[in-house]
Image (tube, rainbow, N blue to C red):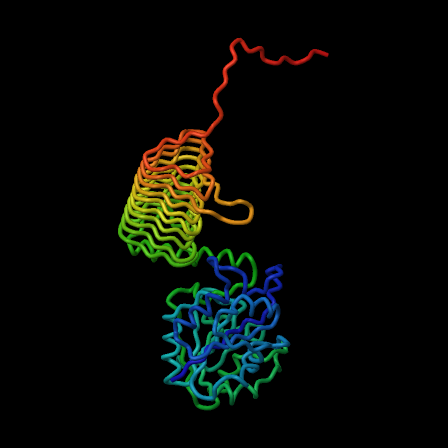
Amino acid sequence: MSTSVIILAAGKGTRMRSGLPKVLQPLAGRPLLGHVIETAKKLQADNIITIYGHGGNLVQKEFAHEQVQWVKQAEQLGTGHAVKVTLPVLPKDGQALILSGDVPCISQQTLQKLLDAARNTGIALVTLTVADATGYGRIVRDNGKIQAIVEHKDASEEQRKIKEFNTGIYCVSNAKLHEWLPKLSNDNAQGEYYLTDIVAMAIADGLEVASVEPERAFEVEGVNDRIQLAALEREFQTHQAKLLMQQGVHLIDPSRFDLRGQLTVGQDVRIDINVIIEGDCAFGDNVEIGAGCVIKNTTIAAGTKVQPYSVFDSAIVGENTQIGPFSRLRPGAKLADEVHIGNFVEVKNSSIGLGSKANHFTYLGDAEVGAGSNIGAGTITCNYDGANKFKTIIGDAAFIGSNSSLVAPVTIGNGATVGAGSTITRDVADNCLAVERSKQFVKEDYPRPQKIKK
């Protein structure tokens, strides 16, 4: 049976007090709507229909790379009206998952259960039972079977005691949506077209309304303001941390760890506090990450130790390297095995060979460094002339003295030595010494200037 996904994403999100539409607010580094679209893709939906309204241009621009069919809801007249505007593009066969763009954590597993339940009945919904369901639409049952959903404002005192509520996540036969949605009425306390009314229509048609509950309560939590967003962020991160620890990762303090993407790990990975992982990352066996590091789209091979407060972006790091503290690997940084990159060293678009070292206050940009070379403190590759970038090549077993400037394009040969404080503008051949600095001048008994007394 074909599956369509309908995502409600037209709301303004006034309580966010933001210029961004609510569905573009970030959770774990990704817009709320992005999480929902990603889950829909995992279900291999035949089409994803997203209903937009407020800030529609921003929303469509953010997801221009996605295969999404956009439908505009010019007036926000309720959830039933929102789904109704999709009817011109919604197939008349198959079934539709109806999701909310501000409920980002619904899992693929829960939605698959919902799909399976709806195949047998034609309609199913996700419900949750809590201690206090104030504010939510209550699930009214008779002998265990769902009879209606009553919104809180329309509920009687007895109905408000019900603890099972409607999460707003449905799976419905497309044919039935085409039949029921045109019949919706707005004769209620809110004056809106409630999607929940299709439940009563289903029962009137003699259908049994199926229901499933999520494995984790936070899956169905929505976001309406900054407080709810922050609370959901922490619940989401707690779950991410739990999954990693189940894989054997040693998180020093799971409450002070953020995963804003995907992390693949080997055995005995150790991560200290306040580490942020972004994008797609992979850590090999026995990798250790120090406190306060930010690591994005980076692969780190086995046995590497990263000292605190280092920042990586789109880097590849070999085995048994030593990095940090306060090191920065920028896009294109490629470190071979057993490399040492020390404090306040920055590497950008450069490859560093086996066992080479740059331990202090160094910038290596657009460079190729061979194996076994030593880059002294304060050395920089001068790779930019204000308009174009140029490459520096440093051979194997080269020694670059402290406070040297290598003006690209330039090549330092195998076994070559550059004296400290040199500015090198010409190639240095293999096994040669290059020194470029002014001759030291000494004047004996030099009288230092004195302040003039007024």
Query: In the figure, residue 210 lies in which quadrant?
Result: bottom left
Q: Is residue 42 above or below residue 27?
A: below
| Farthest-out residue, right | 454
The quadrant in which the N terminus is found is: bottom left
The percent coordinates of residue 242 (x first, y second) are 35, 56
Regarding residue 256, the answer to whether it shows in the image is: no
The percent coordinates of residue 7 (x first, y second) are 50, 74
Q: How many marks?
A: 0
Q: Is residue 5 above or below residue 442?
A: below
- Front-most of 450 and 430? 430
Is 306 placed left or right of 64 in the picture? left
The percent coordinates of residue 282 (x first, y second) are 34, 55
Residue drawn at x 47%, y 28% as measured from the top left: 437
Is 372 placed left or right of 121 in the picture? left
- Front-most of 77 and 249? 249
Q: Is residue 410 above or below residue 47?
A: above
- Front-most of 145 and 41? 41
Residue drawn at x 33%, y 43% as measured from the top left: 370
Regarding residue 387, the answer to whether it shows in the image is: yes
The quadrant in which the C terminus is found is: top right
Q: Is residue 37 above or below residue 179?
A: above
